[in-house]
Amino acid sequence: MKFVRIAAFALAALAASPSFSSDGPKWNEWSDDLFARAQAEQRFVILDLEAVWCHWCHVMEKTTYANPEVRELLAAKYIPVRVDQDANPDLSSRYGDWGWPATIVFGPDGTEIAKLRGYIEPERMQALLKAIIDDPSPGPSVGEAFEVKPSTSAFLDKQQRAALMKTVDEAYEEKLGGWGENQKYIDADSMDLAISRAEAGDATAIKRARQTLDPAIALIDPVWGGVYQYSEAGSWTHAHFEKIMSFQAQYLRQYSQAYALWKDPKYLAAARNIERYLAEFLTSPEGAFYVSQDADLDHDTDGHTYYALPGGERRKLGMPRIDKNLYARENGWAISGLSAYYNVTNDPKVLAIAERAAKWVIDNRALPDGGFRHGEKDRGGPFIGDTLAMGQAFLDLYAATGNRDWLTRAAKASDFIATFRDEAGGFVTSKTAEAKAGVLAKPAKLIDDQTGRKVHEPAQPLLRHRGLSRSGRARDALSRQRLGRDNASPARRSARRRRARGGAHPHNNRRTQGRRSRERPACSGPRAAGPLQATRVAGSARGQTAQSRRRISRPWRTRGVRLQQSHLFVSVLQCRGAAGNGSADGQAETYAGLVEISLRSAINRRHPANLLKRRAFCVARAYERPLRRIPKYSPAAGVRHGRDVQSQKRKFSFENSVTKSPDAP
């Protein structure tokens, strides 16, 4: 009897929970033998890529897949497959431009027949399924794959840069702010570029950044904190209420960065409201971070109704579903956002939260060779995004704390990322293909995965490494200056910057005038093997023998130096091989020519000014590739300008041309 009561209680709880379960087709999982079964049964495969947080996925489940005619057609000639896109980064990356939800129809041999974006009403789905049965030839949504040829240069020329800037400028919406018109949100890449230009004094960029950041505060939940995904109808006040980790991390980072630049209290308040949401709602008991929170409570209580209530009334109704999976990628994003917030608040509790999450990921998701798996049990993988996000997180923690253990972790992650390189150029999303048939037989290779915009990111975590401070005075000043906590006068800060430009080498520092200092080339022996450890040999200018010179070696605190271009950088900027070193020659040759340094001081070919430049110079010299100098220091030291969240165009679950369901809000 006790067992019966327990079973009855469990069934009642499931029925009452906001799980969005409803009568629908018998869904299958994605598996290696999926297309073998499809060929044996001569059935089409229809893939429903959805997300736990996706409002229109729930609407489509309630209306379209519950429709009797649709269910009958699926049962007759299709194998329905449902996949959580957050749990399957390879499929999510390949078909992200079609979600969410994304509906993909395959032939039995794995050939793509149709790709549809967003909500599909029942009548349209019926017509689609019947048309494919009658004529299974690929539709207009399936275009021919075009050949991508790697560029001969890793740098943009003036014409390319001008064309890109024109595109960005034209995309800006002057009236309400933001890039794009119908859906309003902070486009991560565009905002990063605007802030970068604003730092350089671009008045237009300053105006656009602040004109976007100010109204976007309306997307932050005033009760519980956390940022909604976007607003529709060309307004900042018609939110879609899903709260996704990628957006939390992005907005937390960018509002922290904005506060560091302009000291506007509302930006700090915005960042604080996002941080408290992460701490209270998306943090697991183990200290790792969850993935997302749903937009709706259930089929009958949508986000417009639920999130208009005060906190107490919300809790009485229940809590929208939280995706409690613990993925390395999402944790990396969260850690990077928290590191940026710590840099402007100096709150030790925030740093402790970030470090605890990082240690959990290391203990529970690390692979033996420096990479990370996605979740507890991955269908495929390993996926590049998890190691990219964690590598970036380690760099951010290193910049915030000076703890070299984080830098060592980042170095190992960069080595693992290099193994995703495709011989034809670029990087693949996964080391294993999604299937053995059709277009899925080869792992996807997407632009987002090359430029670091998905998380952010082979080019960014691999290579947002830090410049070493050159003198004791500069080092002490920089340790006080972390992101806006420098109380020095503008004149003094300006003088410091001048010393940084001209005083990179000890000869140019007044504290070392009257004695001779020199730096040992990093590529001349095994002592340079440690990751970014500054080595200086100092000796008297007169009469001191080589034997009496004292070798000084210590890990110096760093100042954030941003790479201007997103190009693969040498892992930890060490000399991976010199000419004739066969064991490392292949890897070093891969990196050669992709080295770019973003430093203010000039490069001296014979004696590069500091360790950072020496090590990059070593590779370039060994392979006869010139170094490029694009000077840029970020005054917001420690706050990253790179991008580590998913491409925003992949976040929207509704296509403007699609008619809404009458049951949808």
Image: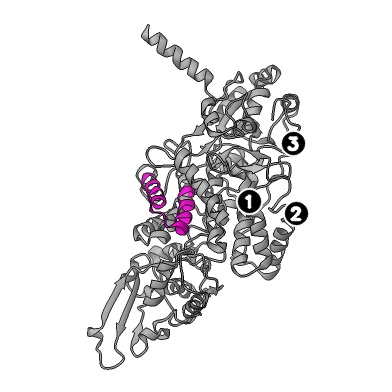
Do the CB atoms of the residues marked 3 and 1 lie less than 8 Å apart? no
**Which numbered disc covers residue 186?**
1
Q: Is residue 490 visible?
A: yes
Give the percent coordinates (x, y) of residue 288.
Answer: 41, 42
In which quadrant is the C terminus drawn?
A: top right
Q: Is residue 560 above or below residue 98?
A: below
* Residue situated in front as seen by the camera: 296 or 593: 296
Tell me which corner region of the image, top left, top right, bottom left or bottom right, holds residue 233.
top right
Give the distance between the C-alpha atoms of the residues marked 3 and 1, in whole angstroms. Answer: 34 Å
Question: How dense is the environment of label 3, judged by Cα within 10 Å: few (below 14), some, or many (20 and up)?
Answer: few
Give the percent coordinates (x, y) of residue 131.
Answer: 75, 27
Range covered by the magenta-colored residues: 333-360
> Residue under circle 2?
175
Question: How dense is the environment of label 2, judged by Cα within 10 Å: few (below 14), some, or many (20 and up)?
Answer: few
- Tell whether position 438 is magenta: no
* Residue situated in front as seen by the camera: 521 or 544: 544
Kindly identify the residue that appears in the image at 62 percent across and 41 percent down: 95
Give the label, 3 or 1, closer to the camera: 1
- Tell whether position 344 is magenta: yes
Tell me the kind of residue under disc 2.
Lys
The disc, 2 or 1, on the residue closer to the chain's N-terminal end is 2
Kindly identify the residue that appears in the image at 50 percent across and 49 percent down: 272
Do the CB atoms of the residues marked 3 and 2 lie less than 8 Å apart? no
Q: In this view, does 312 lie above or below 192?
A: above
The disc, 3 or 1, on the residue closer to the chain's N-terminal end is 3
